[in-house]
Image: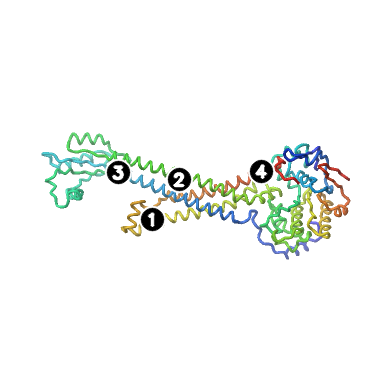
Amino acid sequence: MTEQAGPSDNQKRERMVTLRPMAPIVPPVNVSGHALMVVIAIMSFLCAMTLGAVTMVQEKAEAWQGDVSREITIQVKPDDGLDMEAALTEVRTIALSFPGTLSAEIVDRASTARLLEPWLGEGFDMDELPVPRLVIVTIDESAPPDFSAIRQELANNVPAATLDDHRAWANRLISMARITVLIGVGILTLMFATTMLTVIFATRGAMAGNRHIVEVLHFVGAETSFIGSEFQKRFLLIGLKGAAFGGGVAALGFLLLGAWQSNSLATALNDQVTALFGRFTLSGAGYFGIVGIVVLISAMTAVTTRLTVIRTIREIDRQRADPSLAEIG
Amino acid sequence: MIHFENVGLRYGMGPEVLRDLTFDIPKRSFQFLTGPSGAGKTTLMRLLFMSLKPTRGLIRMFDRDISVIPGEELPLLRRRIGIVFQDFRLLDHMTTYENVALPLRVRGKDEASYRSDVIELLKWVGLGERINVLPPVLSGGEKQRVAIARALIDQPEILLADEPTGNVDPPMAQRLLNLFTELNRLGTAVVIATHDLTLMDRVDARRMILSEGRLDIYD
């Protein structure tokens, strides 16, 4: 700048100097950055596990609900002078005559005997006992038949037949499923809130160690948006790495558990685990939710960083505005 | 370029540490700011750098009243000022070269456009062999020279230097003083806060003497 030298001399001298690639404005991850990454990974893992569990419970509840409401049962009680087989055929014909019924299947004598086997033992004579018979009707869930009309028709033609639409069961299951999902959503909300607060405070903690950098950049003329972007880039990477690791481990956990359950069917341990927790199969929505968590937590880290930079610069300027906050020179 | 009028500053409810300061710093001027320890030299330098606001009085920087400048304009105004902090404020993860280049980098300039200028300036301040060294490895004097180079690299309109020769030997102090006078000759106003009487005797410049919060100026 001040030395008298020709351009060729400058170039010659410059050529002799080997420079390393420019260091980033914000230093690479330090100890507090590593700690932040670990915190983010743990919270993402817990959040993803909670989300996965809630998704599984919700899907399980929907499946139960669907199974129960997909079928109705018509019971024909034996009566004096009633031709049971003819009555069953008529019931089936009546059921199928209504729009909304997909199929109607008479539970035959052998199947009925099998159903009663646990109580009455093998080889009993069904004709000696007044055993009711069943017709199982599969219905279209989206456009179910008019149950009261079927009841009326049955009462007119086969008075011994009664229709059970499983409504009592279905209602109880629906209530239980709703409460279970509600509790799950409540836990998930708390988990999310905890994760967000933890990420925010951990990010601010990690940023506290970078205050001197913000100050120097501010004083050498960097604009707030520039400083914010530099820190945001660095911390977005930290957030993304941590959240991807935590969410990835959770997703992998679900995959491995599902694979283990599929590969060890009919083992005692598997049966017990399945009876307790159900199948560990996460649907596409569950995995999509985990990806959403990773994105959300990374974004939260980046936004918190930017806001912390803006706040730090405001503090520096507040100090400027209030001399009592500054040191005596 | 800079105008102070009846400027006073107190910390909290304490006594005024600076009282009734009225002076101008004209363009292309050269002045020393001196006074006993605790007289308020650093505080006055901070007022000049707009990192403090006065409790009373008027300060105009580059024809702008600083009390009404919005926060977002401050960095743009500070780009016209080069400052050497007493505690250097270098970034430890950046080399000497990168620290000096920082003001140009935050202005969005391409590295190729300033690489030779930065290297040349570093050689001029005697750090040609320390270009790739990180600040923790540098001596106090070397850090000071890096801080000076960083303040000068974008040819500011005014240079504020707080004890710029405090940690260097007399030949280097003379060399730095030559750099400041050369810079001043090229059009930059210079304010050097110093205790060093020998240094002040080497240049025929205005002396601003702070004592008990008051300022006396000897042209």
* Front label number (2 vs 3): 2
Kindly report the distance in space between the C-alpha atoms of the residues bearing marks 2 and 3. 28 Å
Q: Earlier in the sequence, mark 2 or mark 4?
A: 2
Furthest toward the bottom, the residue is: A16
Question: Dot 2 surroundings within 10 Å: few (below 14), some, or many (20 or more)?
Answer: many
The chain letter for the residue carrying disc 2 is A
Q: Secondary structure at mark 2?
A: helix
The residue that disc 1 covers is: A258
Which residue type carries mark 2?
Leu
Q: Are marks 2 and 4 on the same chain?
A: yes
Please state the horizontal and vertical placement of residue A235, each as a whole percent of the image. Answer: 58, 51
Kindly report the distance in space between the C-alpha atoms of the residues bearing marks 1 and 4. 52 Å
Q: Earlier in the sequence, mark 3 or mark 1?
A: 3
The residue that disc 2 covers is: A188
Kindly report the distance in space between the C-alpha atoms of the residues bearing marks 3 and 4. 62 Å
Whether residue A143 is situated above or below residue B109 in the rendered picture: above
Question: Left of A52 or right of it: where is B168?
Answer: right
The residue that disc 4 covers is: A315
Q: Are marks 1 and 4 in contact (CB under 8 Å)?
A: no
The chain letter for the residue carrying disc 4 is A
The chain letter for the residue carrying disc 3 is A
Kindly report the distance in space between the C-alpha atoms of the residues bearing marks 3 and 1. 25 Å
Which residue type carries mark 1?
Gly
Please state the horizontal and vertical placement of residue A143, each as a whole percent of the image. Answer: 31, 39
Q: Secondary structure at mark 4?
A: helix
Instruction: Locate the N terminus of chain A and report the quarter of the image it occupies.
Output: bottom right
The residue that disc 3 covers is: A68
Please state the horizontal and vertical placement of residue B106, each as a whole percent of the image. Answer: 68, 51
Q: Earlier in the sequence, mark 1 or mark 4?
A: 1
Question: Left of A96 or right of it: where is A51?
Answer: right
* Front label number (2 vs 1): 2
Please state the horizontal and vertical placement of residue A202, each as a whole percent of the image. Answer: 56, 49
